[in-house]
Image (spheres, rainbow, N blue to C red):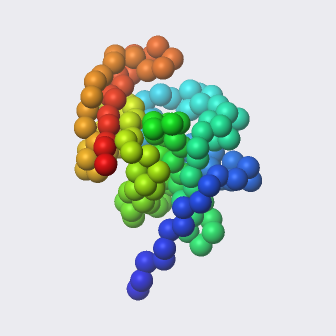
Amino acid sequence: MTQRPIEIRPYQADDNAALSDIWLAASRIAHAFLGEEKLLEHRALVSEFYLPQAETWVACLDGRPIGFIGLIDTTIGGIFVSPERQGMGVGQALIAHGMSLKPRLTLEVYALNERTRAFYEKLGFIEICRRPVDDEGLPFEQISMALSK
């Protein structure tokens, strides 16, 4: 059985609902420590502001979105893959696409999100620094990481 190719294309406004669903499903796993109420609050921000305003690239399989990466200049604002498609190379393809566009990529990841941090380390991201709180001032340590070509 051959693996079907993943297509990566620019975000379109009609992707919003599907990508918001992917964001929530993946975040319930990766960011469960934030709690459901905070995740739903963040989902609204992702849908209304983040997806349309970032440089968002959508990974599709058979024309259907299965993940996305949002770039803000050279920063990965977020990368999310549908839970049933994780571990199949979608995230790696999205990072490779980002690297093809930018000379250097940086990101922040929650220290409690060990699986995602390990994914980034496997791809060559290195820790640059840490801060004890997230962007909202909540006590969730953030790790800044970088990857250069």
Residue 95's place in the image compared with 143, above or below, is below
Given the current orientation, which residue lies at the most extreme right position?
Answer: 14
Where is residue 31 shown, x and y percent of the image? 44, 35
* Residue at image coords 39%, 32%: 108
How many labels sit on residues?
Answer: 0
Given the current orientation, which residue lies at the most extreme top position?
Answer: 137
Where is residue 41 shown, x and y percent of the image? 63, 28
* Residue at image coords 51%, 17%: 136
Where is residue 144 shown, x and y percent of the image? 34, 29
Where is residue 92 shown, x and y percent of the image? 38, 57
Q: Is residue 90 left or right of residue 43?
A: left
Q: Is residue 38 visible?
A: yes
Residue 10, quarter of picture = bottom right
Q: Nearer the viewer, residue 10 or 60?
A: 10
* Residue at image coords 31%, 49%: 149
Q: Is residue 33 left or right of residue 72?
A: left
Residue 46, quarter of picture = top right
Q: Is residue 91 visible?
A: no
**The N terminus lies in which quarter of the figure?**
bottom left
Residue 3, quarter of picture = bottom left
Q: Is residue 73 left or right of residue 148?
A: right
Residue 141's place in the image compared with 107, above or below, is above
Given the current orientation, which residue lies at the most extreme front position?
Answer: 103
